[in-house]
């Protein structure tokens, strides 16, 4: 039986180049807790990537990256504005609330996962500023790519940033799939981050071929002290950190991060193109990055499952497929073919 | 020049057997966030080790293990009694205070790193119980092996447990070097944990040859819900958890965890035996596990450093050496020889 | 010029009987921090009120009462279900998130401020139980009276309680205006609290004639240790507590709490009856307790304001009036008359 | 039987002038949550007292004042240096740890309750700065008067401030008995606060004749936003705040705060002078303020107790007496006489 698992991009394993880097890092002894040369080299590596000095703290998971990033920007008595579909709000078990010391997450209405400037403006102007019964907005957090597989244009981010800054908010980007966004836009990484006023970026590695490597990228170097201590306080400072940093180096070298993400995006497009030609399959959101959301009939879902194709069932007839750095075109095609067969059989 | 780094056991790399297990885990796709078969198998593996059902939560670091373990046992309004040398108190940047929601750490007087029953009893009887100005003791936490390289005898732990339970405290063990303690005692793992009333054990893997793998071992299975959610809230739930769990499996298989620790212990004994024969070198604590604490003359310290031997300078003429699973006997001997040469030269 | 302030019930002063009790408590010395006889007598007083043993912790404010109550019931890794209009969610600046150690508030759809059983059931059945990315519901919190001035019937509460208990949730009641609810229902206090499974009640005093006195009423006496320590940790344990407890005694004596609330309710009914006879004034919610929500024309709002009548402008043409223990019937009538004049003038 | 209670200064009631002010505040309606004129006038009142603009947040208790003050100065990842006898460390149930989001309290060696400059310097120079395993010192907190009844000279505070600032620390003063310190020194309030670099002062009112009124005094007005929101988050924003603010006004008017404290100090001196002439009674600390610490024989303690004199038994033969704004000279003399009788009888 086929076994093609598109349930998430984190069901994939580790990219060979990343694994090789882990193995290569395993020689001799090395200073612990981040004093090793590989970790030391991360600031320069990311600095070159963004064309700008920055401070990089490697951590283990996406939830940690976001909670740590937001704890740098949001005071415990403030609020964080985010999309109602934000991962930080509905899928991280309140990590942000704990690690910030009680900050309040305020979900905003979204369209295809994107926060529109007018929605943000409405939220900011309607805030009862100065009334201590309501935690004042202090941070705007957007996901790029979003949780619904769409990607903000640089101009949209600039518009949000203008609003955020006008009201005194800091700006955070959840980049669990940052590479997919950059690959989609074909822009420079800086164009959608530091250039538009992002203060801290959660840079994702694990979904893009790493084993357990994410990075908190601080474009304000004044945060370098706090980020290090807070990482420790969260149990996110690896004693053998060279093995985490090695993954990030491997990912950035040879432009691999974009190649991996570009491949995943292409596979998602291939999948959505194929599926959307089927009757009864409705594409729910534009496919900018590596996620495909469709509405499909119950019988088609069953058929796919029984033929060994994995996806994420979101209820209400909606399913999500996520492609990864190593998703194979033939598997995508087999997925489409299985769905097509179900349709031909008249599965309802 | 020689390069023998005994600064800590976490300057060592990853044991080949563990690395092989990581590589072996990297095939195909696998459910994420701990739903994979390797993670699923941990409860049975540790259950067999301790001869008792338990729930195991893999996490990335020792600080995370301790903070998570203690958040299960200590209410935010309680106090945690520990040794004044406890890692949780002086070396984890207040992780416990944050992750427990404000619990108070109360350091107790220690002897060679060990809390004596009479000291614990004095603390418990002198507590102003019921006076809300003082956070009431709710947990006793001991390190086994201790931060000073000593090991509690089973009877000592039983004595502490009796006292703790009589006053209604839970009992936590920081086992960052648990393997070294078991190897030293030659006892079963259960004898110094569940059999004496330990509620939750921080089981260390990273210092003992893993890349980034520790385990919160709950002997009270009723904690299995809470530990999973709290781990997530701390950003400690690996999306590709199979690679963390694979490390723990590799460590436990073939009794490797004890072989590795036994070797490290033997190297520490070899080192302390050699050094203690030198005049002007004073052994500061018994060497039960894999740590050696000595007082040595300044000139000897300089000579060792200049000859490429690494150790941890604790100030006041005191240094610490820690041996690991892969410390070589010839390197230990070279270390001793270097010290001996310094002494012969009359280095002060 | 008239000055009738119906902006909230906390703009009122202190009832004379309560002030007298404060003055009477000011003789001689008294043990501090709650060891005084007045505080000691609270358990019996509330026990008699509810016909059931309970433990009572006096605190200073409504926000403190709610945050403290919920910290007893909700683990930091859990979620608290509440109405989307809940004061704990939108008007307490994230106090609950901080004092619980990061619990997540999940707002539910409401009708006139009330959570319907089917809405709760839908939320509970659709929860992805066991998925650690989502904080699991552990507490249901309802306000009685609600923030929109409506009151749950005992049967409605019993229905919610059944659901909550079936899914393992604790049940909290925000009774900032509990007296108004009891006065409206004409039931016993127990019928809508301990009898239907409320675990902890936030009992409000300040809005009902006290200076600064609220009570956390624990129907589960096992919480008596935790509530005392947590109150201290929040800075809510008065050193001269006799003066807080004296207020609660004065409120409960002679059935004053119900007389005060009954009067406030009657004034609200008088106001809503009068206003709803005016054209262009639309009553937005049933007036069960002491709050009146209406939609009125802009010009009428301006006229009322310019004539010295205070109310709370909620935006969008909606205003709120709240009556108190000392609201005078002639002032209510004057309010109505002012609105009527504005209508006659054709104010738009 | 006599009943003279010197157990603490918070066993006393409310000064008549303060009670009168509370009663006077009880007329008409008033904006809630601190928008009333009395609260509004506090900044000017304290500004005049300190000869400098400041922002004042009234709260209910000393523990709240300290926890709130420190949450403004200490990041959750930092450490707060204080005396080993500090109330914030050993008598506030971990309120600081919770309200700061996990800051670490580091107790320093003290002499008669005072932190010496050399002790602070040693702590600061020995800190392993930059090592993330240790929370870095970010705040120095001193009590003035100290918990042992002594008072820092302005020059001593200036010395501590110099050190603190040189290492980048903020400076907090726990002034639960600030009035007693100023009365003792005869200096201006500014001389020992803003003039020596205190950033935030916990100004005590309750022990000095108020019912429940303390103030967080921020000499850095930039803290005015944060202090208001954090107070709310702690449930410390009184809805009927005029009644809290009225107490502070009454205390400051007519220089009452210093008269009250001066009287208490004089009574403490009278008591310590009398007692220290008795054989077998040993004065343990200088009596600068309103607290007297002595070592007295067991039999004398029993005799005093049986004759109705209250004091605080600290164990080990040590007792504490605290005088208040309303302690009567004849009661002090009766206390001394009772002790003298016990000595004459040869009580051991």
Image (cartoon, coloured by chain):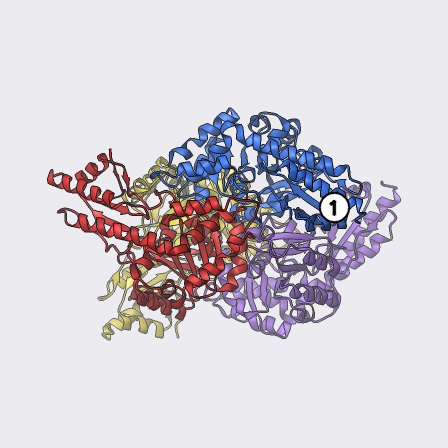
Chain colours: A red, B blue, C yellow, D purple
- Where is residue A31 shown, x and y percent of the image? 58, 49
Give the image quarter of residue B179. top right
- Seen in the image, is D144 located left or right of residue C14? right
Q: Which residue is mark 1?
A: D308
**Residue B55 seen by the camera:** yes
- Where is residue B201 shown, x and y percent of the image? 54, 35
- Seen in the image, is C263 located left or right of residue D307? left
Is disc 1 placed on a helix, strand or loop?
loop
Q: Residue furthest front?
A: B1
The correct choice, above or below, for C183 with respect to C273 in the image is above
Q: Residue at x 47, y 28 (%)?
A: B45
Q: Residue at x 46, y 42 (%)?
A: B231
- Where is residue C28 shown, x and y percent of the image? 66, 53
Q: Residue at x 37, y 60 (%)?
A: C322
Closest to the observer: A121 or D337? A121
- Seen in the image, is D251 located left or right of residue C265? right
Chain to which the residue tagged by mark 1 belongs: D
């Amino acid at each position: 039986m086929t076994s093609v698992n598109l349930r998430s991009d984190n069901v994939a394993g580790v990219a060979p180049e990343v694994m090789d880097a882990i193995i290569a890092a395993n020689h001799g002894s090395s200073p612990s807790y981040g004093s090793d040369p590989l970790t030391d080299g991360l600031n320069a590596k990311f600095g070159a990537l963004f064309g700008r000095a920055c401070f990089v703290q490697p951590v283990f998971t996406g939830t940690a990256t976001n909670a740590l990033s937001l704890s740098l920007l949001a005071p415990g008595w403030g609020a964080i504005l985010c999309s109602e579909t934000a991962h930080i709000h509905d899928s991280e078990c309140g990590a942000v609330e704990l690690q910030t010391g009680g900050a309040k997450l305020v979900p905003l209405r979204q369209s295809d996962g994107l926060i529109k400037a007018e929605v943000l403006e409405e939220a900011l102007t309607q805030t009862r500023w100065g009334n201590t019964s309501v935690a004042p907005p202090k941070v705007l957090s957007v996901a790029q790519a979003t949780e619904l597989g769409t990607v903000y244009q640089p101009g949209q981010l600039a518009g949000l940033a203008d609003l955020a800054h006008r009201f005194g908010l800091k700006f955070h980007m959840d980049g669990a799939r940052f590479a997919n966004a950059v690959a989609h836009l074909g822009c420079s990484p800086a164009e959608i981050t530091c250039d538009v006023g992002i203060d801290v970026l959660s840079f994702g590695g694990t979904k893009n071929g790493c084993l357990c490597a994410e990075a908190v990228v601080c474009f304000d170097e004044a945060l370098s002290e706090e980020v290090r201590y807070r990482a420790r306080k969260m149990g996110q400072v690896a004693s053998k950190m060279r093995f985490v940093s090695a993954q990030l180096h491997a990912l950035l070298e040879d432009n691999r991060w974009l190649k991996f993400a570009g491949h995943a995006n292409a596979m998602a497009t291939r999948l959505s193109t194929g599926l959307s030609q089927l009757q009864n399959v409705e594409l729910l959101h534009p496919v900018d990055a590596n996620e495909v959301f469709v509405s499909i009939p119950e019988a088609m879902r069953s058929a796919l499952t029984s033929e060994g194709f994995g996806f994420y069932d979101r209820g209400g007839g909606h399913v999500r497929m996520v492609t990864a750095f190593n998703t194979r075109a033939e598997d995508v095609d087999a997925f489409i073919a299985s769905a097509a067969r179900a349709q031909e059989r008249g599965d309802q």
